[in-house]
Image (cartoon, rainbow, N blue to C red):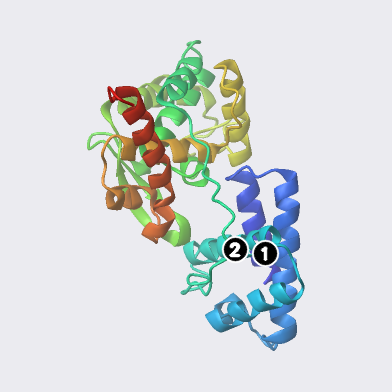
Amino acid sequence: MQSNVDGFLNYMTVERGISPNTLAAYRSDLTQLVGYLTANHLNGNGSGWGDVDEDMMSKYLLHLHALEYSDTTRARKVASSKSLFGFLLDEGIVSNDPTENISSPRIGRSLPDTLSIEEIENLLVSASQQDTPDSLRDRAMFELIYACGLRVTELVSLNMEDLELEQGSVRCLGKGGKERMIPVHDSAVAVLRRYILDARPSFLKKDSERSLFLNRRGQRLSRQGFWLILKSHAKRAGISKKITPHTLRHSFATHLLQGGAPLRHVQELLGHSSITTTQVYTHLTSEHVRTEYDKSHPRA
């Protein structure tokens, strides 16, 4: 069970960009959860996350209450558990989420950070200022991840054969091995074509290499490598917000909903197994609607 927790923490660090303090809190919370489950409910003979049910998690909540944790701490521990089981469900490690109906103390909701459309444009401009292989690759990556709402793992895992540029689509293997085809708009396709023709050959060391995005050693670009590239361009573009690869995914979803895309369509594009995961973005778009209302209404 601990190895799955370690995999989750690695995902939260690399893809979600959580701070060291948040990582330490997650590690503490989930170590406590594992300890409670193994001491009180699981016999240890091959038992794992798939054996955890809603009754066990409800009793865990009572256990936290009995320890007299504050509402904020209990809410965080429940959120840690929910995030873990969401990860396990997406990875196909469990088939049901025992925390789905578990509620926690209401202390307000944290919404994901997003970039404005102008900030996205500035980021793309930053990657276009030099006509070098590095710049062409960076622009192509930013265009594709924002055009499709990809996770960083999905982006760097792409191979040449996953692109269908004539049809304007990309084949993506998401969490739990789920495959989806995502449309790619024409301007992103044009940038990808230029990268493939003019820049990728400069990185290529072996003709047999099928990875789409390469580093200077001719190897598949890593998640960490992409993150460093993104932070460098964000700084150059004057973006002061904390930015991670997931920020671009959040921005993709938010901008689609602000443009009128149905929630179900955005869910399919993001590869969310449950629409409740996608619904967090409706809070962001509601704020956008309110802002536009205040700007536009003559009496506002």
In the displayed structure, 24 sits above or below 46; it is: above
Answer with the quarter of the image where residue 17 lies: top right
Residue 199: x %, y % from top left: 46, 21
Outermost residue to the top = 130
Which of 64/34 is in front? Answer: 64
Q: Residue at x 67, y 86 (%)?
A: 41
Query: Which mark lies nearer to you, 1 or 2?
Result: 2
- Left or right side of 212 for 167: left
Which of 284/41 is in front? Answer: 284
Residue 81: x %, y % from top left: 61, 65
In the displayed structure, 70 sits above or below 260; it is: below
The residue tagged with tag 1: helix, strand or loop?
A: helix
- Left or right side of 102 for 116: left
Which of 48/85 is in front? Answer: 85
Tag 2 residue: 105
Q: Amino acid at mark 1?
A: Arg
Which of 81/184 is in front? Answer: 81
Q: Are marks 1 and 2 in contact (CB under 8 Å)?
A: yes
Give the quadrant of the N terminus: bottom right
Residue 186: x %, y % from top left: 26, 27
Real-space Cα distance between discs 1 and 2? Answer: 7 Å
Q: Which mark is residue 65?
A: none
- Left or right side of 220 for 145: left
Which is more N-terminal, label 2 or label 1? 1
In the displayed structure, 97 sits above or below 217; it is: below
Residue 284 shows up from this direction:
yes
Give the quadrant of the C terminus: top left
Answer with the quarter of the image where residue 16 lies: top right
Tag 1 residue: 74
- Left or right side of 299 for 119: right
Q: Amino acid at mark 2?
A: Pro
